[in-house]
Amino acid sequence: MFEDFRRALIEGDTQALDLLMGNAARAGQPPHLLRDAVVDNTLLHVAADNGRVREWLATLALVREADVGVMPEMVAARNRLGRTALHVAAAQGDTDGVPLLIEAGADVNALDDLKLTPLDYAQIHAPEDVMQRLHVAGARTGDALVERPVPPDLMPTIVEAMYNVGSDEWKRLIQEAIADQVPVERLRYRGGHLLHVAAEEGLADECLKVLGPERATALVNEPNDHGEMPLHLAAFWGHTPSVQALIDAGADVHAVGRDHASAMHYAASHNCHDAAIVLIGAGAPCDLVNAEGLTPFGLAVRSQHHSMARLLHDALAQPAAPVSAGGRATVPAEAPAPAAMAMQPSPRHWQQVLQDAPSTTARAGSVSPRSVQSPSPMS
């Protein structure tokens, strides 16, 4: 029966197709499930190979109405080479069939046994409008989809380059890895990922740019093995530009990590005044309690960080400023925020504090982050 259908499809004989549909129904053989004996093609593969996708879909209209699951099953069917009908239509440059199959739900990024997508085949013979239609649907080439293995020495090499102050070698290494389709977001070092190392070294702002928005989003709120976020480490070491860049990239200022400590706990524990001001301006809470029962203010008082304690005391006494989607506090146009909101100072207040207070960022004169395996805001 398959051969009869194939012949009628190739010839465009609608009368023969209607007759065969009736025969198939009486025989209890769903035509969309018929396959040939050579490469296991379905009749949709045959239609795609001969520019007859529209005719075949029209022939199956009644079957599709009776069973809504027919279409997804048809467009997903693969032959013995792992190719879908969309692979075949793209290879033929079928300007009519490709859009129809995409509209029917065909996977534009399906990989065949050679790790090739429909776009790979379209690039060989298809006209520009077929490739454009695939691109609009989100199609990519197989090279772009197949992950390369992670070289075992790549992350240590990148980290060592990051430790080399003033060198941009680490950027080049990451860019080359991305160009080679290496999943850099999976690189790990001492329980953390790229942004953890960059945050410790004060390079998170630059690292985010190199990674790009998609990879940055995947990593910015991913903890290390100690439960710490990159924002926690940037705050602990007082790397203010990194703190701001991570917040702008979507870092959660409310997230708690090791010992149930927030980024504000980390900044307070190391007396990182400027980092704390940025966090407060982004809406970071000052009243969270860590595992020891201490707020950031309590931690600053216990550590005798007097300027930090004053900053946090003022923060708890100030009415809240609304926080924009980008993580920066905004000045209300009219009335101040209601007291029921989280008690945070206005950005104008913090701008004045930043101007008046001496900078106490941790990078100058602090212990190198390399000597601290996992900083704790508990001490």
Image (cartoon, rainbow, N blue to C red):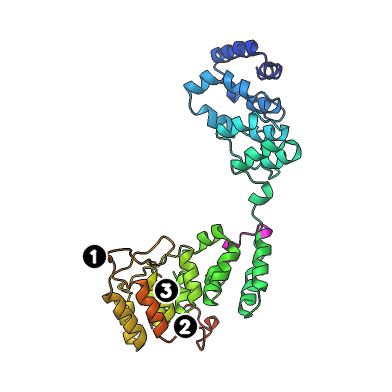
Amino acid tagged 3: Val
Mark 3 highlights which residue?
A: 278
Q: Nearer the viewer, residue 17 or 133?
A: 133
Q: Nearer the viewer, residue 360 or 178?
A: 360
Residue 311, image x and y in percent?
34, 81
Q: Secondary structure at mark 2?
A: loop
Residues at marks 1 and 3, CA–CA distance in whole angstroms:
22 Å
Residue 376, image x and y in percent?
42, 79
Q: Is residue 187 above or below residue 20?
A: below
Amino acid tagged 1: Ala
- Please identify the quadrant where the N terminus is shown: top right
Task: Name the main secondary structure of what is drawn in magenta.
Answer: loop
Label 2 close to label 1 by CB (< 8 Å): no
Q: Secondary structure at mark 3?
A: helix
Say whether disc 2 or disc 1 marks the residue closer to the N-terminus: 1
Q: Judge from the rendering whether residue 133 lies leftward or rightward of residue 268; answer left or right.
A: right
Amino acid tagged 2: Thr
State the extent of the magenta-drawn residues as a range: 179-188
Mark 1: few/some/many CA within 10 Å (<14, 14-19, 20+) = few
- Please identify the quadrant where the C terminus is shown: bottom left
Residue 182, image x and y in percent?
65, 59
**What is the number of callouts on the image?**
3
Q: Is residue 188 above or below residue 370?
A: above
Residues at marks 2 and 1, CA–CA distance in whole angstroms:
32 Å
For the view shown, which residue lies furthest in the right direction?
Answer: 124
Mark 2 highlights which residue?
A: 361
Label 3 close to label 2 by CB (< 8 Å): no
Mark 1 highlights which residue?
A: 340
Q: Secondary structure at mark 1?
A: loop
Instruction: Tell me what residue is drawn at x 64 percent, y 69 percent.
Output: 171
Mark 2: few/some/many CA within 10 Å (<14, 14-19, 20+) = many
